[in-house]
């Protein structure tokens, strides 16, 4: 933990200076230029639910106040965002102006022509410098397709490990650094405390768990494809081992964990019903009680564990940079300029710093300056440890698999996970998944897909280094 | 009779009256199907708008598509289980309310509510009811069994079919009930009394007198429900979206997923044509035989 | 009718008592069945009034402490409630159009047997095709129109035309039955009196078929109102209907139960009104006219 603090302090020292050196900020430029569109309305596709509270309650109204442009938020469930955006592009009605795009889909959407190339706008409105201060892993992997900018990385999503410091300490246990240790520790805690408290819980619903699988599969040494033949190798011994272990772990987790999503798992952890969990960054904030008094979060159970939560990287040390969001402009928009200016303003140093600190929203620190923000660090006593863990995750994290028609590969995994919880044999499931992957690859064209895969696999954060 | 009637006034009027309807039906009913047929021979998918003709490639692929055949199987399973249960429950309820009882109209009006609400709302409602922690169903089962229940209705493969079937049967049993109640009310009273005087058992009376009398109603009720079940979509969509895995995927859901999520446009067109062909044959054959065609 | 027949039987006291006990049992049965079938609807309504703490109570509570309207207020504040308005616009317009066009066609078929049995069967078989199979090509058609610069996806007219077409077979089928119930002699004497065909339609047929028109219209409205799959495929933002909106609250980080329930209730209340209005025509309406009720 001491090391984390040091990293954080160092980052603060360096980046605090850079941040101050700007003359007219990108946010101001955007606001000035956008005033000419006052009175118009732009639509932005946003993930349904909590994520949308940001544009609904904060950034939308503020933008309206600054520029006179109305923002209409289109809430779409995560699992349907890709579909809706592509459907809309196919239909070409221009219903969507700005978009939230999960980075692993960006290349598909760009290839289909659904996204507007942003380079021209970036130059026109002087945004290049501020794009550079986005944390490297997001900037280098979630912004471009080829050499063209298609989106602004806007959410530092990474799986973190949250644990009860007090409980581990009481039992003389250390923070698990491998999945074996994790299972051992969790089992011991469950044996001792259940049913009052379980050693661990996770969200286990298929859409989220497939990311968890991607992480663990690679941490254990798995490779998705054979680089020569492009045959799917997801059904290797490693894959089967991870699948089998994941199901085995459910036994020391609370009954019914297979159906848990983000909120169920959160509720249990905050109530002190579980001692360890892995999830996206907002858990860390809410566990500390930050912002849970807000009316928008009234449904989040009050944290019983504020001050007792430790932050670390998940076992294996290479957290999945699961999902995340980039802001893009729809190619069929009829108001591209205004849509662009809105996302530049949202993504800018100034606005984004406010947005990642919105207690009720789900955008997580993604700029160097966010990790270093004194304001943020003062939000709750352990906030600096939290930011340090996030920053560390942003360095060692693993990218979501991204190929041509990624969604089809993910869909096969999602179905696999859901069959896993249904009790089928891991080897049989993964053989099916691999067969589906091979079929998709063949349809797309093995050589074409191989090129895309090798390009992805060559990135430093594709596999653990 | 008809000749004198038709002879009066403008003879062309019958065409003037019907052409707008036929035009719309052709426009929305026929033209798109021809278009689908065209698309099914092309090769359009998510990323490519390849309009060159690919012959019967997609039709050939239908045969090797296990997910498609499984989805047809799931649809038939839902139909085969839900239909008889709805029928029997509906019949039992119809008998319960058959004889005069004050306030019957109110009961019937209340019981018919499930039929009238949107199936997607029905599905959403049952999703809330089946929730393993915040829903009342596990709670009630807990009271009955005496220990807390955490059945994962929509995840556990042993419970997901019962869950969907319960929702489906809940919504549509009143439909059967209502129709059978009407049918039973119209059974000739004197025949029943004659059977009673002969000392015929209840069963015998039912088979020999009641069933033949309500057969037309029964047939139409079963036909309507069977066709509804074959296109089952909303309730399953709200509850499981076809999961876990593809375990509860119906043919309609499969077509939606292929067409609008996987963007296999041409392949979906082939699936659609197959469904249309199969169903049209069945429907037209059945309709021609049935009372409804008169 | 049956009970009336029995009550004329000699009033044996023992028989009376048995009959009364039987009636009591039937009431108990009726109440149990009704409670079972209404419980899900009760639960839906209750959740829409619960506070977050009450919704996420485990074990669940069976009633809301107070009837607080916050869950509804939020739908109006965020503008989600406009989806109910969209449903209303689309369902009403398509009903009116389908009723006009459909009744005309029904009259033609009922009185002149236009097209013979085959046309009638073709029309009703249109109704039997699974909606997914209809909407898929319609989507492609609308997209194609979009390329020509005509906005049909996510537009009122796009949905209205589809619902009209989808409901037409039903209207034609039902109205044919209702019109056939009207004695043809009335029309004949009117024609002999010198009224034109349209005057006959307007002054004789419509007033006579008023009840049928009304019942058919309410059912037609309801089909459009309750539809999910057409709207799912053909709407984006501007004309999203309430069933599609309900599904938007599933998923994401959590299921937004309060919104699901409140939005569902908003979309269900009009249906309850429809049921109240329809009483006499329910059976005939839902059995495609096969059972006269």
Image (tube, grey):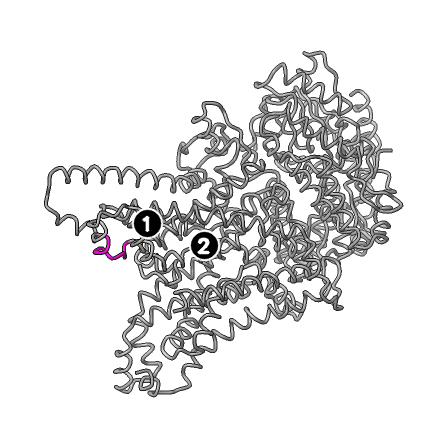
Name the quadrant of the C terminus of chain B.
bottom left
User: Would you say residue C139 is visible in this rendering?
Assistant: yes
Q: Position of residue A375 (x, y in %)?
A: 71, 30
Residue reaching furthest right? A228
Residues at badges 1 and 2 in contact (C-beta under 8 Å)?
Answer: no
Q: Secondary structure at mark 1?
A: helix
Residue bearing the label numbered 1? B109
Q: Which residues are magenta?
A: B185-192
Q: Secondary structure at mark 2?
A: helix
Residue bearing the label numbered 2? B225
Q: Position of residue C182 (x, y in %)?
A: 29, 72
Above or below residue C225? Residue C109 is: below
Same-chain status of marks 1 and 2: yes
Residue at the image point whose x is 68% and y is 57% from the top: B63
Indicate the chain on which mark 1 is placed.
Answer: B
Describe residue C33's horizontal placement relative to residue A149 as left or right. Answer: left
Q: Residue C291's image quarter?
A: bottom left
Above or below residue B78? Residue A386 is: above
Indicate the chain on which mark 2 is placed.
Answer: B
Task: Give me the C-alpha separation between circle 1 and circle 2.
Answer: 20 Å
Q: Nearer the viewer, residue A272 or A356?
A: A272
| Crowd band around label 2 with a 10 angstrom C-alpha radius: few (<14), some (14–19), many (20+) | many
Disc on the earlier residue, 1 or 2 = 1
Q: Nearer the viewer, mark 1 or mark 2?
A: 2
């Amino acid at each position: 933990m001491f090391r984390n603090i040091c990293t954080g302090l160092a980052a603060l020292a360096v980046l605090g200076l850079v941040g101050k050196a700007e003359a007219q900020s990108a946010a101001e430029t955007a606001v000035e230029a956008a005033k000419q569109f006052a009175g118009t309305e732009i639509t932005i596709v946003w993930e349904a639910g909590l994520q949308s509270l940001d544009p609904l309650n904060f950034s939308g109204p503020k933008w309206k106040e600054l520029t006179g442009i109305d923002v209409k938020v289109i809430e779409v469930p995560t699992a349907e965002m890709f579909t809706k955006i592509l459907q809309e592009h196919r239909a070409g009605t221009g219903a969507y102006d700005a978009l939230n795009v999960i980075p692993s889909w960006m290349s598909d959407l760009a290839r289909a022509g659904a996204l507007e190339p942003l380079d021209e706008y970036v130059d026109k409105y002087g945004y290049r410098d501020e794009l550079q201060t986005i944390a490297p892993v997001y900037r280098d992997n979630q912004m471009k397709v080829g050499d063209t900018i298609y989106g602004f990385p806007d959410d530092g999503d990474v799986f973190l490990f949250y644990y009860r410091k007090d409980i581990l300490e009481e039992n003389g246990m250390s923070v698990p650094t491998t999945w074996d240790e994790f299972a051992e520790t969790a089992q011991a805690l469950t044996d001792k405390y259940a049913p009052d408290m379980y050693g661990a819980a996770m969200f286990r619903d298929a859409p989220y768990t497939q990311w968890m699988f991607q992480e663990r599969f690679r941490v254990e040494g798995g490779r998705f494809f054979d680089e020569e033949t492009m045959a799917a190798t997801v059904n290797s011994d490693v894959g089967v081992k991870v699948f089998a272990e994941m199901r085995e772990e459910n036994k020391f987790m609370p009954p019914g964990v297979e159906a848990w999503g983000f909120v169920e798992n959160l509720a249990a952890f905050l109530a002190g019903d579980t001692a360890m969990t892995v999830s996206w960054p907002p858990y860390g904030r809410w566990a500390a009680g930050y912002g849970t008094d807000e009316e928008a979060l009234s449904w989040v159970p009050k944290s019983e564990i504020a001050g007792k939560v430790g932050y670390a990287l998940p076992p294996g040390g290479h957290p999945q940079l699961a999902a995340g969001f980039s802001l893009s402009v729809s190619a069929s928009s009829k108001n591209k300029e205004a849509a662009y200016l809105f996302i530049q303003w949202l993504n800018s140093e100034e606005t984004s710093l406010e947005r990642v600190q919105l207690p009720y929203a789900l955008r997580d620190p993604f700029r160097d300056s966010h990790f270093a923000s004194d304001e943020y660090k003062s939000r709750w006593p352990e906030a600096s440890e939290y930011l340090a863990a996030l920053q560390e995750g942003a360095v060692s994290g693993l990218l979501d698999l991204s190929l041509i028609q990624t969604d089809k590969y993910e869909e096969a995994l999602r179905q696999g996970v859901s069959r896993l919880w249904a009790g089928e044999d891991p080897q049989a499931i993964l053989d099916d998944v691999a067969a589906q992957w091979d079929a998709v690859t063949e349809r797309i064209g093995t050589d074409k897909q191989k090129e895309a895969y090798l390009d992805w696999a060559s990135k430093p954060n594709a596999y653990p280094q | 009779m008809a000749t004198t009637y038709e002879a009066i006034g403008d003879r062309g009027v019958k065409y003037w009256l019907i052409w707008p309807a036929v035009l719309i039906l052709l426009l929305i009913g026929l033209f798109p199907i021809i278009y689908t047929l065209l698309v099914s021979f092309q090769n359009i998918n998510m990323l490519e708008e390849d309009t060159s003709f690919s012959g019967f490639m997609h039709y050939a692929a239908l045969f090797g598509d296990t997910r498609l055949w499984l989805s047809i199987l799931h649809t038939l399973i839902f139909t085969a289980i839900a239909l008889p249960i709805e029928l029997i429950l509906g019949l039992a309820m119809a008998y319960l309310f058959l004889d005069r009882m004050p306030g019957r109209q109110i009961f019937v009006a209340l019981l018919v509510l499930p039929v009238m609400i949107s199936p997607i709302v029905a599905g959403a409602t049952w999703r809330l009811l089946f929730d393993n922690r915040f829903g009342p169903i596990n709670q009630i089962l807990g009271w009955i069994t005496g220990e807390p229940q955490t059945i994962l209705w929509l995840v556990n493969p042993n419970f997901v079919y019962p869950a969907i079937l319960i929702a489906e049967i809940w919504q549509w049993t009143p439909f059967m009930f209502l129709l059978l109640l009407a049918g039973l009310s119209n059974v000739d009273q004197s025949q029943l009394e004659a059977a009673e005087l002969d000392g015929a058992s209840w069963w015998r009376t039912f088979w020999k007198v009641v069933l033949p009398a309500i057969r037309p109603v029964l047939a139409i009720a079963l036909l309507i429900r069977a066709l509804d079940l074959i296109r089952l979509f909303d309730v399953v969509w709200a509850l499981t979206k076809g999961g876990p895995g593809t375990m509860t995927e119906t043919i309609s859901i499969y077509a939606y997923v292929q067409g609008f999520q996987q963007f296999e446009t041409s392949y979906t067109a082939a699936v659609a044509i197959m469904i249309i062909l199969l169903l049209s044959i069945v429907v037209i054959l059945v309709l021609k035989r049935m009372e409804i065609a008169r | 009718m049956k009970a009336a027949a029995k009550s004329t039987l000699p009033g044996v006291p023992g028989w009376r008592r048995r009959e009364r006990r039987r009636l009591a049992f039937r009431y108990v049965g009726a109440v149990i069945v009704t409670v079972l079938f209404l419980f899900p609807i009760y639960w839906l309504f209750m959740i829409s009034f619960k506070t977050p703490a009450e919704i996420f109570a485990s074990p669940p509570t069976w009633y809301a402490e107070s009837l607080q309207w916050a869950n509804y207020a939020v739908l109006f504040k965020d503008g989600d409630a406009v989806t109910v308005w969209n449903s209303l616009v689309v369902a009403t317009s398509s009903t009116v159009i389908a009723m006009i066009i459909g009744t005309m066609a029904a009259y033609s078929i009922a009185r002149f047997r236009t097209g013979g049995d085959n046309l009638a069967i073709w029309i009703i078989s249109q109704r039997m095709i699974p909606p997914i199979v209809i909407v898929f090509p319609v989507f492609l058609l609308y997209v194609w129109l979009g390329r020509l610069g005509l906005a049909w996806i996510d537009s009122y007219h796009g949905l209205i035309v589809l619902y009209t077409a989808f409901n037409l077979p039903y209207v034609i089928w039902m109205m044919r039955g209702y019109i056939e119930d009207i004695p043809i002699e009335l029309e004949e004497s009117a024609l002999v009196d010198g009224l034109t065909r349209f005057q006959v339609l307007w002054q004789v047929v419509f007033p006579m078929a008023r009840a049928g028109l009304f019942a058919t219209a309410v059912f037609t409205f309801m089909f459009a109102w309750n539809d999910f799959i057409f709207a799912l495929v053909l709407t984006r933002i501007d004309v999203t209907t309430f069933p599609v909106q309900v599904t938007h609250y599933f998923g994401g980080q959590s299921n937004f139960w309060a919104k699901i329930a409140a939005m569902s209730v908003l979309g269900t209340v009009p249906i309850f009104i429809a049921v109240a209005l329809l009483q006499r025509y329910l059976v005939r309406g839902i059995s495609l006219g096969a059972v006269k009720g």
